Amino acid sequence: MPPAPNHPYVGRIAPSPTGYLHLGHAQTFQIAHERARAAAGKLIFRMEDLDRPRCRPQFAAAAIEDLKWFGLDWDEGPDIGGPHAPYLQSGRIRFYREFLDQLIQAEMVYPCTCSRKEIQASVSAPNEGDEEAIYSGHCRNRSAKDVPTTGRFNWRFRVRDSETTTFVDGHFGPQSFTAGNHFGDFVVWRHDGIPAYQLAVVTDDILMGITEVVRGGDLLVSTARQILLYQALGSPPPLFHHCELVRDSQGFRLAKRHESLSLRLLRTHGADPGRQMKLTREPNSN
């Protein structure tokens, strides 16, 4: 359902400049654009560039150019500015730190010294459909005040045992995810001083006044985690609309390694953006 009349629609598109955008990104951003314009609302462009080793300035510039070629526009963003600047996450670290401090003060996070290798070794089975392994809970009895004086640690959000998070998705309908089954305590701040994805996007969506998040269906479990963060930070979550993933001829979802379906290559080869927009919306068109 649309936001209440006294809460004008604010959507966002948030690419990560780790490669050239492909038709799967374009479909999701096209749907976000359509929903914002249909609601006579605002669309914000935010560049999620916190993955320092993989992000490149040329991919950031290409994302803006290629999405404009694809027929999209926005009301705020790194290329045009706006009241919620900066629109690059790398320039918004202080906001993420403020929200982390709130979680620390409320004892909703704890320092975790487990390495990625140790966490993977403790997982009995993969968490299908999600990239983050379910944490074993080795450090979860620590207080937020038990900060190690030496060595590396992550800040991890404490999820109540067997807690079920539900929401109604605008496309996939009712969703339900249970702690310990679908996800566990999750990282919100990494040992290298960079916020994790979950905290960064929730912080930005709160501060930018986002009323609906449109993104790929592979992030449904992430939405459950993020709803818990909204609750912990005392902010109502936005609506969510997850999109079908665009897949290749073998049925695998598109990734940035699919260079033949990148917007940059299609544009370079003189493809018709209107036709490409139509093809992304047709079943089995790719």
Image (cartoon, helix red, strand yellow):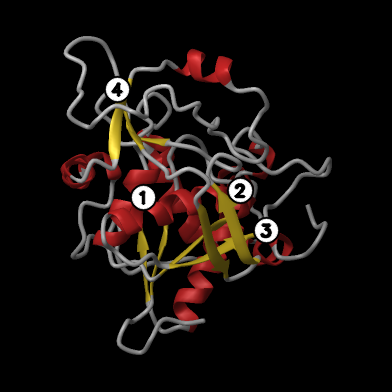
Q: Residues within 10 Å of mark 4 (few under 14, many from 20)?
A: some
Estimate the x, y position of residue 128 in percent, counting from the top left: 68, 37
Q: How far, Cα to Cα, is label 3 from label 2?
A: 9 Å
User: Label 2 neighbourhood size at 10 Å, few (<14), some (14-19), many (20+)?
Assistant: some
- Closest to the observer, 267 or 14: 14
Residue 266 tag number = none
Q: Residue at x 43, y 36 (%)?
A: 185
Camera-nearest residue between 185 and 238: 185
Q: Is residue 78 visible?
A: no
Provide the residue designation for mark 3: 244
Q: Are marks 1 and 4 in contact (CB under 8 Å)?
A: no
Q: Amino acid at mark 3?
A: Glu
Distance, label 1 to label 4, CA atoms, is 18 Å
Q: Position of residue 55 (x, y in %)?
A: 40, 32
- Kindly identify the amino acid type of the residue bearing the numbered disc 4: His
Q: CA distance from mark 1 to mark 2?
A: 16 Å
Q: Which residue is mark 2?
A: 218
Task: Find numbered disc 4 in the image and state the secondary structure of the residue it sits on.
Answer: loop
- Which of pointers 4 and 2 lies earlier in the amino acid sequence? 4
Q: Residues within 10 Å of mark 1 (few under 14, many from 20)?
A: some
**Residues at badges 3 and 4 in contact (C-beta under 8 Å)?**
no
Q: Which mark is residue 191?
A: 4
Quadrant of residue 61 in the image?
A: top left
Q: Which mark is residue 201?
A: 1
Q: Secondary structure at mark 1?
A: helix
**Vertical side of 80 occupied by 188: above or below:** above
Lower position in the chain sequence, tag 3 or tag 4: 4
Question: How far apart are the two marked residues, 3 and 4, measured between alpha carbons?
Answer: 34 Å
